[in-house]
Amino acid sequence: MSALADQPYVKMNGLGNEIVVVDLRDRPDKLTADDARAAARPEGAPFDQLMVLYPARTPGTDAFVRIYNTDGSEAGACGNGMRCVADIVFADTGKTALTFETRAGLINAWKGAEPLVSTVDMGAPKFGWRDIPLAEEFRDTRAIELQIGPIDAPILHSPSVASMGNPHAVFWVDDPWAYDLDKIGPLLENHPIFPDRANITLAAVSGPDHLTMRTWERGAGLTKACGSAACAAAVSAARTGRTGRHVRVTLPGGDLVIDWRERDDHVLMTGPVEYEREGRFDPALFAGAAAS
Ligand SMILES: N[C@H](CCC[C@H](N)C(=O)O)C(=O)O
């Protein structure tokens, strides 16, 4: 029987990034990739990311969190989803600061000054080619040799690449809306230079401390917002001299504020969350999943 059968869930969003949260903190069950794919079906609870809360594994942490994309793959990081999960745990513990454990490490979150706003510490970015990872050595990941389109007139080229716990490529453009990201995105996501695939962002510098961007997410496709991509774009903008270390990032779903802290290199992301509805997964959804 699937861990999700008849399991309650909360449907939320972070800037329109569709997040479903399932709380298994007091259950022994474990979710499979098949469960996640079944849950993403239209008759389930469609999401961009499914966030699953498990009991804490490490002393001093509040929960262990696993993050699934719609194709059942797991993401090391999801900034918008972490704010949603944090808001739920703020409400049930009364705490204003939390530490979560994810596959990419520990993530701290703080309640913001306004209701339904919070800050997540996404940790330090990684820029080494092995960390991202890339399939071959690049000494300078501020702009790597990668292009699509005709050799002498590429449509997109020379992205900055970074890991925020998940792999990101950021292409600098004048207008992120001027491209068919739904067509280009899958090609770049699966490009052989990215052995673990990658989240693909088109970003424009809109002001000295302002970026505008759109993202094709690995394993999930076009989304209204991708928090970790906003962090990747912000650190890439700062390290290429395009902006300072504190920026506002406008995504299709709204704005995030990103701070790349000098003191410890950590990236802090501040933004809103919204509750949409509560529901319960229909056991019939998982009949096929359990059999496969
Ligand atoms: N929506 C997310 C990230 C999803 C990550 C994902 N698509 C992957 O790396 O596999 C965010 O707010 O950070």
Image (tube, grey):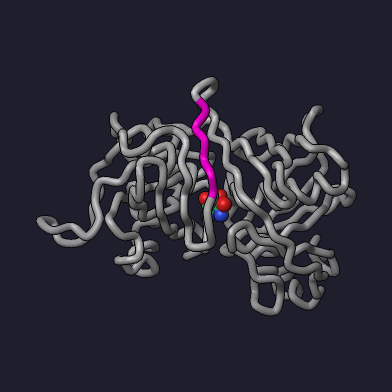
Magenta residues (range)? 256-261
Q: Quadrant of the C terminus?
A: bottom right
Q: Residue furthest left?
A: 152
Q: Quadrant of the N terminus?
A: bottom right
Q: Is residue 285 above or below residue 32?
A: below
Residue 206 at x, y percent in the picture: 35, 50
Name the one closer to the observer, 238 or 244: 244
- Residue at left 73%, top 41%? 111
Judge left or right: residue 11 versus residue 27: left
**Which quadrant would residue 152 be assigned to in this image?**
bottom left
Name the one closer to the observer, 156 or 84: 84
Judge left or right: residue 26 versus residue 51: right
Residue 188 at x, y percent in the picture: 35, 57
Residue 259 in magenta stretch: yes
Judge left or right: residue 162 versus residue 271: left
Helix, strand or loop for the magenta stretch, by majority: strand
Residue 68 at x, y percent in the picture: 63, 56
- Residue at left 62%, top 58%? 49
Q: Is residue 35 above or below residue 174?
A: below
Residue 56 at x, y percent in the picture: 80, 38
Does residue 53 appear in this view? yes
